[in-house]
Image (spheres, rainbow, N blue to C red):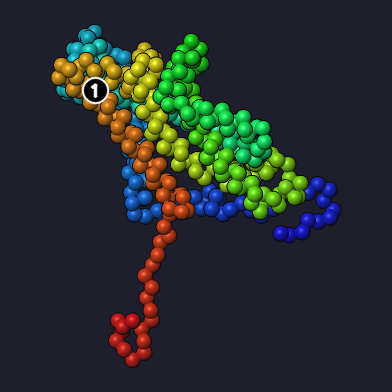
Amino acid sequence: MSAIPAAEATPTPTGPAPSSAARPGRRFAALRSARGVPRALLLTGSGITLFFVLLAVFAPLIAPYGFDQYSANGQRFAKLAGPSAHHWFGTTVQSVDVLSRVVFGARTALEVVVLAVVFSIIIGVPLGLLSGYFGGLLDRILVLVMDALFAFPYLLLAIVIAFLLSDVVIGGGVVTTALAITVIYVPQYFRVVRASTLSAREATYVEAARAMGAPARTVISKYLFVNVVHSVPVIATLNAADAILTLAGLGFLGYGIQPTEAAEWGYDLQRAIADAGAGIWWTALYPGLAITVLVIALTLVGEGLNEVVNPSLRRARTRPVRLPARPGRGRGAQ
């Protein structure tokens, strides 16, 4: 460590740089150098996820009708009409086009999942940093609260929060549902970040920053944050896949987004139960298929990121060693 000039009145925390493995450049380099199964998982999951993102963003342009539109040109659509040239995925008992419901359902899923994951990270990561760095009474209280939340079955907890927020207007049903799902995932980010902070706070570069008088805010933001959040993208991706199922579960049970506000795959599945008994398969097949494919895609992205980003799982590329040819022998001899 270089000496600090005596003329400086206030010491500046210029301790050893954080671990190079946590630098964003190294992370992107690891993604670019991924090979084999991790690369295949990452590319496949990312491609399918991008497809659903495009569906969500351009839903008004892709969907042939509105998510609750049941007529066109002054004529009402046929009820429970099978797939045809006019309605590729058929219609529901409310005469709504199934394809339009599926496309707009992708937008609803994207909005809820993005909000839930962002809210969870904003709340869980800072609490984990503060709890792991300061410890003491604050740490005990936060651990107790997070363990209590973590002990609840996740779907039951989401139902309770959605019920409590049902009478509170906070940006409509999308934001309310996102907040209900957020409560489930905050403890996960808290526990992962807290565990990483507990080990990182004893590192040499953190001790050096403290010795030079760096305030706690600087130590946490400059030295600890970049070294404890390397697992957050992986957790966020896996949580996004789980949030799709939670959103569908809430909609299936009637605690999610109201059908007049937006299209939602779980609600469509609940309405299709009666149709399945009558041999009408298209009202349940396509929403269920959309849920399954998107969950698998996000899971593939999470597993691929985990193997690529995690140093303990990432395999370094090796090249075969070629020895120079010995004098007096053939050109291809080793």
Question: Would you identify the image quadrant in which residue 93 lies?
Answer: top left
The residue at 43%/38% (across/down) is: 237
x and y percentages locating residue 55 in the rendered image: 34, 30
x and y percentages locating residue 47 in the rendered image: 34, 41
Q: Which residue is at the front of the view, 33 or 232?
A: 232
At label 1, the amino acid type is Ala
Q: Is residue 307 visible?
A: yes
Position above or below: 288 against 34 = above
Q: How many marks?
A: 1
Is 149 left, or right, of 138 in this rendering?
A: left
Is 6 left, or right, of 26 in this rendering?
A: right
Question: Would you identify the image quadrant in which residue 49 lies?
Answer: top left
Position above or below: 110 against 203 = above
Q: Which residue is at the front of the view, 108 or 296?
A: 296
Q: Which residue is at the front of the view, 157 or 53?
A: 157
Position above or below: 288 against 267 = below
The residue at 16%/22% (across/down) is: 84
Q: Residues within 10 Å of mark 1 (few under 14, many from 20)?
A: many
The residue at 46%/50% (across/down) is: 310
Looking at this view, name the residue that lies furthest to the bottom: 328
Quarter that holds the N terminus: bottom right
The residue at 76%/46% (across/down) is: 213
Q: Which residue is at the front of the view, 70 or 266?
A: 266
x and y percentages locating residue 172 in the rendered image: 46, 16
Tell me the residue that label 1 is attached to.
284
